[in-house]
Structure formats: structure tokens, C-alpha cells
Amino acid sequence: MGVQVILCMVLVGLFMVMVRAKVPAMMVFGDSSVDAGNNNYIETVARSNFQPYGRDFVGGKATGRFSNGRIATDFLSEAFGIKPYVPPYLDPNHNISHFATGVTFASAATGYDNATSDVLSVIPLWKQLEYYKGFQKKLRVYVGESRANETFAKALHIISLGTNDFLENYFAIPGRASEYTPREYQNFLAGIAEKFIYKLYGLGARKISLGGLPPMGCLPLERTTNFIGGNECVPRYNTIALEFNDKLSKLTTRLNKDLPHIRLVFSNPYDIFLQIIHKPSQYGFQVASMACCATGMFEMGYSCSRASSFSCIDASRYVFWDSFHPTEKTNGIIAKYLVKNSLAQFLH
Ligand SMILES: *[C@@H]1O[C@H](CO)[C@@H](O)[C@H](O)[C@H]1NC(C)=O
Ligand SMILES: *[C@@H]1O[C@H](CO)[C@@H](O)[C@H](O)[C@H]1NC(C)=O
Ligand SMILES: *[C@@H]1O[C@H](CO)[C@@H](O)[C@H](O)[C@H]1NC(C)=O
């Protein structure tokens, strides 16, 4: 090895250490957008720990991530110089020494609303917070109370959910729609988000990213069933995503004023996601209207089916992996955008 190479490695190492000091860990809460496999350890059908899921993941492993490879939080963790994968809290193969630098409590198919997590019997948001409290106890024992407290204050807490409240619950099954208008339901959910942030703050969190909704009317599942609209994006669902995002954005502004020393950012994937869907070729994609997995099938489910032998050859040409979830490539583009546009302040 040349001197330059070694010097370069030392500099890269130093840079990683400097970055890591700013954000030493990532604590993740939410749904399938950020679940790395917690649902493998509970009784639910909302799972993806089978092929072809994970076929482009390291070792071709179907970890329970709803993608062909990594999900956005994996890319974010890497961008912050921490580690390339954020492990699921319920995985018995991981212990506190791994979780100390990042862990996800997320559960696919969950929502802000308890009634959403009930649909497929997944982990509700309040339970994810209970897990986080348990994790805090373990970390205090493992590294000592003051270092643990410092970790909670410096760690980036990521909240990413809400799509299922609308698509899996409000618009899919009777119940909430008879109690609330869409706008009232949005306020109900935003109220839960606010309480959740207060609770995280009470547990010592100071850096929090609140995720916005994607253009959910453009998910292949919604397009496939949009017969009248010629299989285009469903405008009504996109409008609701925009309205809800606006509420979350205002909530962010307000809580930054109300909670001393909090740094809360609104991480909004909507615009970049819609741009990718409208102009896929600009991002190196060929297909945005259908999913890679089960291409050509009338795919109605939450995940692509075990039995389906139809999946595209090269997922990197597709925006969507299954009818509800982006490919690894899309996840990477969105994560990069979020780092640049909302999370960059935590790098410095
Ligand atoms: C965690 O697991 C690793 C093996 O993956 C082991 O070396 C380490 O001692 C364990 N740490 C704790 C705190 O249990
Ligand atoms: C959800 O359920 C938990 C546990 O039963 C409860 O504490 C919480 O208040 C519920 N949330 C809402 C918004 O009803
Ligand atoms: C750690 O945080 C807890 C809860 O906020 C607090 O009660 C405790 O005094 C803190 N301990 C240290 C050593 O900072």
C-alpha cells in the first residue's frame, strides 16, 4: 500500500469518527418503510422474510425488509457514518452492543392509529415506545447512565409512518371513516404524532426527524385498482398526503418553539418521490407504474406473494419493488435527498 493510500484511509477514518460524534446512533419508529424485520418475531401476515424479498441484500437474505435490498434508514445510518444496516429490536441475534449505535422498533403495516396496527396485528406505535424504554434501561446498564443519556440526546430519532392509516385502514375498512371526515382523521393522527414527540422528548431525545407521507396515490396497488382513472395515480390520495404533510410541517415549526433545545425536522419525501414517478428515466429507471415483483400480475396484496414466480430481472430499473414499497435504488435516492434537504443540519 502506498503512503497516499494509507494517509487517505486515516483521513477517511478520522472523518467517520468526527461524523459519528455528532450523531452516535439512530433510533427508528414506524412502519414498513423503516422495519428491518421486527414482524418476523410476531404473529402477523405482514411479513417479507421470504424470497424474492432481499434478493439484492447482502447474501441475498430476506431479512424482513420490504424491498429487494436496503431501506431508507440503512442508507441514512451509512450517510451519518454509523453503520450500513439498522437492525430490528426483536432480533435475538443482536444484543445491546449492536443496538447502542442504532436500532429500529418499527413494524410493517402499523400506523399512528391503534386501529391501524390492529388490522394485521402488528406492533402499535405506543408499544414501540415501550420497547424504546426497555432499550434505554439496557443501555444505561451497558454504558452507564451519563453516557447513555448523552446517546439519547445526540441520537437521531426517526419517525416514519402514516400511509397505512389511510390506505390500510381509513379507506379500506369500515370504522374510522364513519367517525371522522378525512380532514378530522388527519387532525386525529397529527395529534398522536404530537404526543409521541412529547414522549420522546421526555425520554431525553433532542434530535428528531418526523417523516412525511409519500405520494401514496401513486403506489402500484392504488394505480392497479384505479380502473376509472386509467390506472393513473389516484389524485384524492395524493391530495390527502399533501394536506397531512402540511399539518406535520406546521406541527414541526410549533414544537421547535415550544420544546427547549429540541431540533425537530420535517423530512418530506413527497416531492422527490413524485418527481421520480413522473420522470423515471431522469433517475435511471424504466418503470414507475408497476412493481418489479409480480410484474404483470393483478397484484392486490400488501407484499408480493410467496407463490408468485413473476418478478423482473433487474430491480434497479423499477421504482417499485412490490405493489406498496420502493426498490433499494429508490430508497437510496430518497435517503440521499433527505440528508441533503432536511437532515444535513445534524451532520455539523
Ligand atoms: C453481543 O454479541 C457479540 C457476538 O455477536 C458478542 O461478541 C458480545 O459479547 C455480545 N455483547 C453483549 C453485551 O452481550
Ligand atoms: C392506543 O392504545 C394505548 C394502549 O392501550 C393507549 O394507551 C393509547 O391511549 C391509545 N391511543 C389512542 C390515540 O387512543
Ligand atoms: C439520565 O436521565 C434521566 C432521565 O432523564 C435522569 O433522571 C438522570 O438523572 C440522568 N442521569 C445522568 C447521570 O445524567
Image (tube, rainbow, N blue to C red):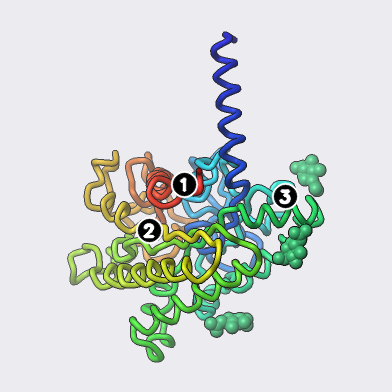
Residue 156, quarter of the rendered image:
bottom right
190 shown above or below 139: below
Q: Position of residue 182 (x, y in %)?
A: 34, 81
User: Of helix, strand and loop, which one carries label 3?
Assistant: loop
Which residue matches tag 1? Answer: 68
Q: Ligand 1 lies in which image quarter?
A: top right
> Which callout, 2 or 3, points to the residue nearer the camera?
2
Which residue matches tag 2? Answer: 268
User: Of helix, strand and loop, which one carries label 1?
Assistant: loop
User: Of helix, strand and loop, which one carries label 2?
Assistant: loop
Q: Position of residue 320 (x, y in %)?
A: 36, 52
**Which residue is pictured at 31% across the width and 72% down the height?**
243
Residues packed near mark 1 inside 10 Å, few (<14), some (14 to 19) or many (20 plus): many
Q: Is residue 227 among what the camera can see? A: yes
65 shown above or below 21: below
In the image: residue 116, left or right of residue 315: right
Q: CA distance from mark 1 to mark 3?
A: 22 Å
**Three-letter code for the amino acid on which mark 1 is drawn:** Asn
Residue 273 or residue 258, whichever sits in front: 258
Residue 308 or residue 300, whichever sits in front: 300
Residue extending farthest to the top is 2
308 shown above or below 77: below
Some atom of ligand 1 lies within 8 Å of the CB belonging to the residue at label 3: yes
Which residue matches tag 3? Answer: 93
**Which residue is pictured at 58% across the width and 34% down the height?**
16
> Which callout, 1 or 2, points to the residue nearer the camera?
2
Question: Which quarter of the image is occupied by the N terminus?
Answer: top right
Q: CA distance from mark 2 to mark 3?
A: 33 Å
In the image: residue 320, left or right of residue 17: left
329 shown above or below 106: above
Residues packed near mark 3 inside 10 Å, few (<14), some (14 to 19) or many (20 plus): few
